[in-house]
Image: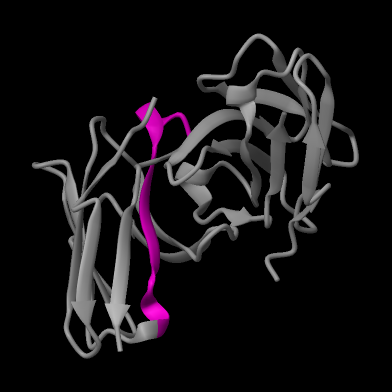
Amino acid sequence: DSGVTQTPKHLITATGQRVTLRCSPRSGDLSVYWYQQSLDQGLQFLIQYYNGEERAKGNILERFSAQQFPDLHSELNLSSLELGDSALYFCASSVGLAGNTGELFFGEGSRLTVL
Amino acid sequence: SQQGEEDPQALSIQEGENATMNCSYKTSINNLQWYRQNSGRGLVHLILIRSNEREKHSGRLRVTLDTSKKSSSLLITASRAADTASYFCATDYHNNNDMRFGAGTRLTVKP
């Protein structure tokens, strides 16, 4: 158990809909990262927050948004969903900024299926 | 965009053999990390090597880093069927402290 909690574990929805994925980082971790993993693919970096502020942005679509709340949990909002958005969405946390403080701890992911 | 690229994409070996996976990256880094992912599960951190280190060991794992070639290798010695998984390298991107992952190497260890 990494200590990172992601909900929901599975989500099935229709094209055009909007969903929210939630992540609770490990206790004490200030950084949260979101990644997308399509079937049998690598991890695409979406966005990173540190202590409530956005710190880095990857190839995140404009239809996607995220935030980190004062209690450090984070939410990833996906709107106007398309079939191609079906993927595993991972949240990871670290104590500080990964380049300086080391490893990321991953949740078990939220599997999104868009029909 | 991806930062690292693993090679090979897939590797199949017999139990007891050694497995070597390589990773190349594009920018200067603070550290390089290797992660393991069992099918459909979250990634698990294996080992971290800093840019001023050349080699690191952890149990049956040996990692090397060549910053002049922007490459790293992960060696798993005396592999076991339980080592079957995908292995990813990750680096901080442009020293921005966000971690970018490669596409991974899928390792199959046959009993």
Foreground residue, B28 or A105? Answer: A105
Q: Is residue B42 left or right of residue B7?
A: right
Residue A57 position in % (x across, y down): 56, 21
- Residue B85 image-quadrant placement: bottom left
- Magenta stretch holds residue A13: no
Outermost residue, right direction? A71
Residue A36 position in % (x across, y down): 57, 36
Residue at 58 percent of width and 37 percent of height? A35
Q: Is residue B98 left or right of residue B33?
A: right
Whether residue B15 can be seen here: yes
Foreground residue, A111 or A104? Answer: A111
Residue at 33 percent of width and 59 percent of height? B106
Residue A103 position in % (x across, y down): 52, 56
- Residue B17 image-quadrant placement: bottom left
- Magenta stretch holds residue B90: yes
Q: What stretch is highlighted in magenta?
A: B82-97
The image shows residue B52, relative to residue A77, as above or below, that is: below
Whether residue B98 can be seen here: no
Foreground residue, B32 or A79? Answer: A79
The image shows residue B48, relative to residue B108, as above or below, that is: above
Residue at 23 percent of width and 31 percent of height? B26
